[in-house]
Amino acid sequence: MEKKWFVSMKKADFNRIAEKYHISPITARLIRNRDITGDDEIDLYLNGTIADLCDGMLMRDMDRAVEILAEKIREEKKIRVIGDYDIDGVNATYILQEGLAGLGADVDTDIPDRIRDGYGLNKMLIDRALDDGIDTIVTCDNGIAAAEEIAYGKEQGLTVVVTDHHEVPYIETDGDKEYLLPPADAVVDPHRPDCGYPFKGLCGAAVAYKLVEALCDVMQRDPEDMDYLMENVAIATVGDVMDLTGENRIFVKQGLEMLKRTHNPGLKALIECTGIDVERLNAYHIGFVIGPCINASGRLDTAKRALELLNARTRREAVMLAEDLKALNDSRKEMTEKGVEEAVRLIEHTDLREDKVLVVYLPECHESIAGIIAGRLKERYYRPVFVLTRAEEGVKGSGRSIESYDMFGQMCRCRELFTKFGGHKLAAGLSLAEENVGLFRRTINELAELTEEDLMEKVSIDMQLPFPYITEALIGELSLLEPFGKGNPKPLFAERNIRVLGPRILGKNRNVLKCRLEDPSGNQMDAVYFGDVEACLRKMEEKPVMSFTYYPSINEYMGRKTLQVTIVNYQ
């Protein structure tokens, strides 16, 4: 697939920034490329701490939510936290359960079963709460789209507090949006159009954490007692692929440090069981090692298993649960590979290939991995993708989008096709009748106003960086920009007219390409590549002078340190 490379050319006085913050002009340019401008923003980016987080009471309805819950705790009413079955929902549930219990609440939890219950609140969960004598339901990472279910709960005499971070559903008429807030007693969601909270990008667990903090304040307890829950906010923020900017950057930075010395037996066991070097633990390990294990329980079993891990009190119980989650994730990986292969076969051998928005129906695919498969197809074809699977009732699906396509917004334009839907600009979930699959594919493509330019993946390069500039000191300084992830990508440099020397494929699974790179001045550098190594090797052998995008690192082997670059793209 052809990609368009471009170099960010954002302007600033890099020497002044470098001098003021004791960094190199290269790092100053990288910060500017991430749209961090002005001394306050730069200072927050480099030195932000917990003290810089905004007051949760700035969120609309936070005062009402806190007042309701403080009263329920004093009256010893039974409170139930209802979360979601993904990494954000599980951690948000744990945060509210821990926070409320710590303040003396009579609290328990429930998490919907992905297949039996589907996403978010439903009447079955509400009936279960009523049967158990629950007085108050607090949702987390769901609830904003559950107007009907919440109305039902209210009719039955329940108090309902919604905490969520998803977009508020709306109906659009002649360009005007009518937002549909659920009829709960309090609705805390930074995406409410009338919410003045300055940072909109929080995950569900972060909103839950803000509620716990505010509640501590009102009940005259020290909010710092709850600081340890920031490790769960960090896991949820990275795992739910939120932008690592503003408050999220602080949450993840602080949370990762806490996670390295966590007192939570379950998290400790999961870190050990997956073989992570705890001292080098970073956002990558949450996104690609810890996170998938937590998510696997909600996908293939029940998310309550992941919540049990967080609640484990003994090492023995923690180790057993951690090993179970790792095994579930291993089998999820296998199922995903098969699903991706089947989807690619379908796209390549049918007229699906012509569509700007891919709607792929895999009836036999396990519905829990539809989102992962959609993500993999989006990367491969660089276009919005919906993967649909046959469910107990009708068809369920998940979508993953590209930057130029507002997936949730487009779905709102054909909402009559769905029995249920929700999501963000870049990801969504839906249910629909099986007979509407073809109609959905046609409609969503007719509505799509995507150009050829939109469908060409763009590679944003920070700057051209000659090899002699790569030093151990520069690599050390790049760590100031961590944690890396969505919204704060790892620095990407480029060089052209580079000669490739001695390319070869290594590794037990033949999944690493190693070579030497030489610039026109004769400067050489070790390089590795981890993508499609066979295709890359063929290209290098055909044309040994190429252009590369890369990031630099230090390779430590047998106590010896050498500079190397990791190749990201080549042409």
Image (cartoon, rainbow, N blue to C red):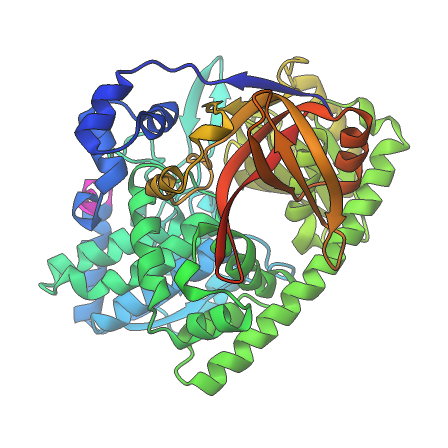
Quadrant in which the C terminus is drawn: top right
492 w.r.t. 513: above or below: above
The image quadrant that residue 53 belongs to is: top left
The residue shown at (49%, 25%) is: 466
**Residue 231, position in %: x, y?**
34, 60
Foreground residue among 417 and 197: 197
**Does residue 559 appear in this view?**
yes
Foreground residue among 364 and 345: 345
The residue shown at (55%, 33%) is: 550
Most common SS among magenta residues: loop
**Residue 169, position in %: x, y?**
46, 34
63 w.r.t. 358: above or below: below
**Residue 436, position in %: x, y?**
76, 35
Question: Left or right of 33: which side holds 424?
Answer: right
Quadrant in which the N terminus is drawn: top right
Foreground residue among 396 and 274: 274
The answer to if 55 sits in the magenta stretch is yes
**Does residue 154 appear in this view?**
no
Q: How many marks?
A: 0
The residue shown at (69%, 31%) is: 500
The residue shown at (37%, 73%) is: 264
The image quadrant that residue 428 belongs to is: top right
Question: Left or right of 218: which side holds 448?
Answer: right
Foreground residue among 561 and 190: 561
**Residue 397, position in %: x, y?**
67, 44
Q: Please identify the residue farthest to the left as the structure is shown.
A: 220
Q: Which residues make up the magenta segment? A: 54-61
The answer to if 245 sits in the magenta stretch is no
533 w.r.t. 154: above or below: above
Question: Left or right of 12: which side holds 423?
Answer: right
Question: Left or right of 199: which side holds 377?
Answer: right
